[in-house]
Image (cartoon, helix red, strand yellow):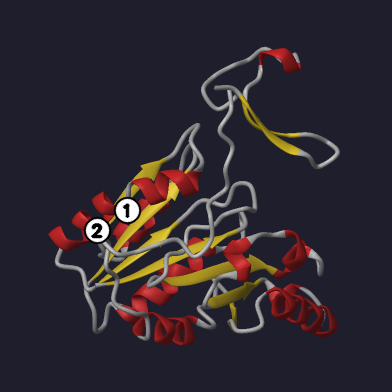
Amino acid sequence: MKVIIAAGTPGAGKTAVLLNTIKQVRKQHQVAVVKIDCLYTEDHIRFSSIGVPALLGLSKDMCPDHYTIFNTGEMIEFAEKHKAEMLVIETAGLCHRCAPYTSNSLGVCVIDATTGPNTPLKVGPFLSTANTVVITKGDVISQAEREIFRERVLEMNPSCRIIEANGLTGKGATEIAACFEDAAEFSYDEERLRHNAPFSICTLCVGETRVHQQFHRGVIRHLNGVQEYLGE
């Protein structure tokens, strides 16, 4: 089974891009989709409407990356139940530190060109470790701005394949589908993350609401950049 993991900033058009791409891929392959979001979405209904099995997962107060990684086994079981040859996982954009790609998955980063030329420098490993970077909304900025944005992407990830896409017209879907076809075979038992996921193991994570510093333990980072662990 091939596994495609799509990550990106909120509102970048991940779902629209994937819908157009899956329409191309499903002509030759059985596809299953898992949509991961934080609090609410109806995107899984959009995937179901084009005839592909779709599963929804809401991470709620858990980091979407941690939620996705922990539940990968159940996602694989869902895809196998539907005899899927490809599993497409769309993860939620949250803190721009997303790092959901595994060693043999196809990592697809969807990023919005209208967010500014410095955005590729600000986001984390969901761009720098991706195989394919899909740039959306380039039609609403100038050619010069598109070129600058493209160069900034390559600064962060020189080896990636860049595809310009449009979720409304379907532009780029055929090229992205070709990337899906070239993905490696996924082995759940042997997979490892390409980059460590965002971390914060502290009292805030388990529900502490008091603000004063004396009430907080765990992995703590201070304003001066010093990181320490407080606790047993």
Q: Where is residue 92 shown, x and y percent of the image?
A: 51, 51
Q: Is residue 29 above or below residue 221?
A: below
Q: Where is residue 148 shown, x and y percent of the image?
A: 81, 80
The foreground one among 148 and 169 is 148
Q: Is residue 87 above or below residue 34?
A: below
The amino acid beneath tag 1 is Thr
Q: Where is residue 141 shown, x and y percent of the image?
A: 79, 75
Q: Are marks 1 and 2 in contact (CB under 8 Å)?
A: yes
Quadrant position of residue 157: bottom right
**Within-10-Å neighbours for mark 1: few <14, some 14–19, many 20+:** some
Quadrant position of residue 119: bottom right
Residue plotted at (26% across, 64% down): 52
The residue singled out by tag 1 in the image is: 72
The foreground one among 194 and 139 is 194
Q: Determine the CA span between mark 1 and mark 2.
A: 6 Å
Image quadrant in which the N terminus is located: bottom left
Residue 76 - label: 2
The amino acid beneath tag 2 is Ile
In the visual, does 104 lie left or right of 231? Answer: left
Residue plotted at (56% across, 63% down): 13
Secondary structure found at label 2? helix
